[in-house]
Image (spheres, grey):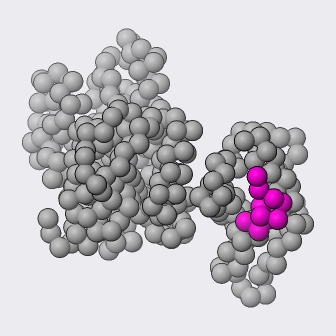
Amino acid sequence: MTAQQVSTYAGRIAVVTGTRTGLGKSLAEHLLANGAKVVGMSRGAPTISTPAYSHQRVDVGDDDQVRSAFILVGREHKRLDILINSAAVLTSIHALVMPAARAEEMVRTNFLGVFFTAREAAKLMRRQRYGRIVNIGSMASTLEPVGDSVYAATKAASMTLTGVLAKEFAGYGITVNTVAVSALDTEMLRKLPRERVDEVVASLLIARIATTEDVLNVVDFFVSPSSSYITAQTIFLGGVHG
Amino acid sequence: MLSNEIVESVIFRAIEALNAERALADRIVPTVDTGLFGTDATLDSLEFVSVITDVETTLNLEHGLEISLADDHAMSRPESPYTSVATLRDYITELADER
């Protein structure tokens, strides 16, 4: 932990989605370790237990659930400084055999979930005229891997959303940015055939699997109070071209 | 249950908050007839969004009234609830009564 990280997060109220496992959980733990109070949101039961962490079981793709969850955040904490949208689902399968239910679930969680949470977060952030929204994107949005038709499209849509929301929220002191993650060793990645992952990693300018620290580094930058002039940006890890 | 006076005061407060960004000569003194949206609107489109969001958030956080003022129900009514302070007040009290 650095002094810069502590000053970025100490005393801040943050919502992190997708905190049950994987990157979302790591992000929440990182914020907690640096002094933030974190409200985690995921469909499942909490997997983090510490006084500064509270958990709401929320399907981010359900507008009513998201709305109620953020009202609770506002009532309990009176403010919100940071939203990190990490919740995502992936079904990687050839488009010809993609079940509609899986496609719809990806659209709801990966795209509408980002919209619903950002909208409700911004309602709280604008009251203090300060906020940082970071969306976790994916290299799939530009690499367009076979099998990821809907997943890649939802991540591309979420990047477009970042740009429009950044414009709409700029006057309220709220920044909106995306860190587009390359292959990261998570439960999601382990669902993919190893040879496909190796092929994609080999194509990166920096040909290795990403680490959680690579992501946290960019999140720290976007969330820092010093980054008030940084918005509507997407940073790709690993040298992927946007 | 929220009285008309309380709801009006929440709406007035949201409109008055806009005055900080307006020139002295353009400041709004809200009344129940102040136009919010449409041909007689006193607010521009961004100010309208601010007022609706402020009113909704204040009702949610300070008065425990969990409502949405920008859902399909509101937008599809034959008579817009957003026309004036009075129509918005009436719509909010109607929603509150349904709870």
- Quarter that holds the N terminus of chain A: bottom left
Residue in view at x 43 percent, y 23 percent: A103
The stretch of residues the image draws in magenta is B1-10
> Residue A77: x percent and y percent?
45, 61
Along the horizontal axis of the image, is A18 left or right of B24? left
Residue in view at x 90 percent, y 66 percent: B33
> Residue A41: x percent and y percent?
38, 43
Residue in view at x 33 percent, y 16 percent: A94
Along the horizontal axis of the image, is A52 left or right of B79? left
Q: Is residue A194 visible?
A: yes
Answer with the quarter of the image where residue A24 lies.
Answer: top left
Q: Is residue A219 visible?
A: no
Residue in view at x 47 percent, y 54 percent: A73
Along the horizontal axis of the image, is A101 left or right of A138? right
- Farthest front residue? B1
Which sits in the foreground, A151 or A73?
A73
Along the horizontal axis of the image, is A190 left or right of A57? left
